[in-house]
Amino acid sequence: MAHINESYLELSGSYLFAHINRRVAAFRSSHPDADIIRLGIGDVTRPLVPAVIRAMHAAVDEMASAATFRGYGPEQGYEFLQEAILDGDYRPRNVKLDADEIFISDGSKCDVANIQEIFSADVKIAIADPVYPVYLDSNIMAGRSRNIVFLPGSAGNDFLPQIPDEKVDLIYLCSPNNPTGSVLDRAALTRWVEYARENRAVILFDSAYSAYIRDETLPRSIYEIPGARDVAIEFKSFSKSASFTGVRCAYTVIPKELKGFDRNGNPHLLHTFWNRRQTTKFNGTSYIVQRAAEAACRGEGRIQNQAVIDYYMGNADIIRNGLEKAGYTVYGGKNAPYIWWKLPSGLDSMKFFDTLLETCQVVGTPGVGFGSCGEGYFRLTAFGDRERTREAVKRIVAAGL
Ligand code: PLP
């Protein structure tokens, strides 16, 4: 008999975003003339920048000639992209990494979900609440539903994960955080690195939104913190920094000092384990996409993408300032493309989703979709069109919800 993985039965019902899409579709069919503005899903809307498009075209042309055609590439990614990443994201911030410590992939979602495979089934895992739901769901799928320690975020702790009383082995940190927009500063990140060093724990640092950090004092990489190379894996993505949500490219950094331990306490290099995992289960990111990502890292491509990020952050300012001026309490939106809106007290975020859709024809994301501590909050994203964002804020303010 084909027994199922019963852990899947422990996942919370229908995935929130599918649920939202169904509700929007139902509203659309009952109100065919409604002018709906979507500030819900975290997808970008601006196109790929010209330097990236040019690089992709050139790579396509290379594929057309036997002399320059590429078949299977290295599963870890091409060195030209690893070097471009070092030039773009690390060398300017004085972070020293070797090119082969960077594993290129087709997305951070897969990487943050798959990384747990190289750890034992009984590791205890700390996960912030609210946060990107993939960390929790992928560990539930792997049978760890009873090994999770939630780190509750609230206005009282600036939605920043605090060190737990009980000992944990793996710690997911998302900074800037999706959905709250909060960012761990140097002091907070240093405390986590020290905790991990003292407890032989490993930090899984997801900085998919680091390109949105405007405050120069905030760390964009965990490796800016002394000692982090021994205890941290870092995930970054081109999705939100270079409009690659449909193109797909990301990377995971595993320093060669970083160790996990077997049940006898013997150390093993996690770099070796992840390399083994990737070479077995992943066949590399396409050459064309890696050339496109290379163009996004440096020179013109980087400048053009920065202008796109500035555009989105201009939207974030409009949402944040507009709601604040109307008397609402909002968080985030300063160093992240997400605005975390505190709902007037007692309002249920799922019900508020319907109210906002019906009264303003604006779509957002209920906070409860990111964890129980997200109840009472609502996420708006800055990834929309400028004028439509202005219009959404105008409607919300006029409705006086
Ligand atoms: N990590 C966080 C915190 C995210 O919000 C997202 C996407 O929304 C991802 C990772 C996934 O990124 P990718 O498109 O690279 O899979």
Image: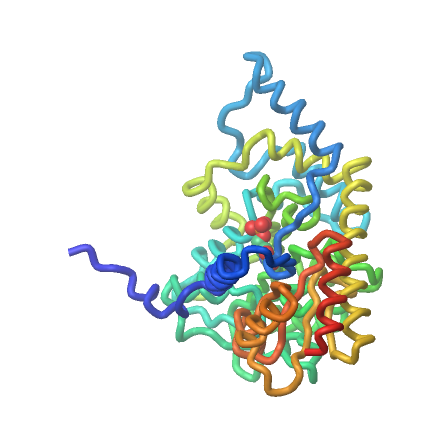
Q: How is the image coloured?
A: rainbow
Instruction: Tell which quarter ligand 1 is in.
Output: bottom right
Say whether residue 297 is visible: yes
Measuring 64% from the left and 68% from the top, which residue is drawn there?
Answer: 379
Q: Nearer the viewer, residue 285 or 362?
A: 362
Residue drawn at the location 63% of the way across and 24% of the way down: 59
The residue positioned farthest toward the top in the image shown: 66
Quarter of the image with the C terminus is bottom right
Taking the spot 41% from the left edge, 41% from the top edge, the residue there is 280
Please state the total of marks drawn on the protein image: 0
Q: Position of residue 141 (x, y in %)?
A: 38, 62
Q: Position of residue 94 (x, y in %)?
A: 80, 51
Outermost left residue: 1
Q: Position of residue 39 (x, y in %)?
A: 65, 60
In this view of the protein, which residue sits in the foreground, 219 or 386?
Answer: 386
Q: Quadrant of the N terminus?
A: bottom left
Q: Is residue 348 left or right of residue 145?
A: right
Position of 271 relative to 178 (above/below)? above
Q: Is residue 344 left or right of residue 322?
A: left
Picture quadrant where residue 336 is located: bottom right
Q: Point out residue 75 in the picture as x, y percentages from the top left corner.
A: 51, 37
Residue 261 appears anywhere in the view: no
Question: In the rendered view, would you say 226 is above or below 353?
Answer: above
Is residue 124 shown left or right of residue 173?
Answer: left
> Which quarter of the figure has residue 129?
bottom right
Residue drawn at 32 percent across, 67 percent down: 9
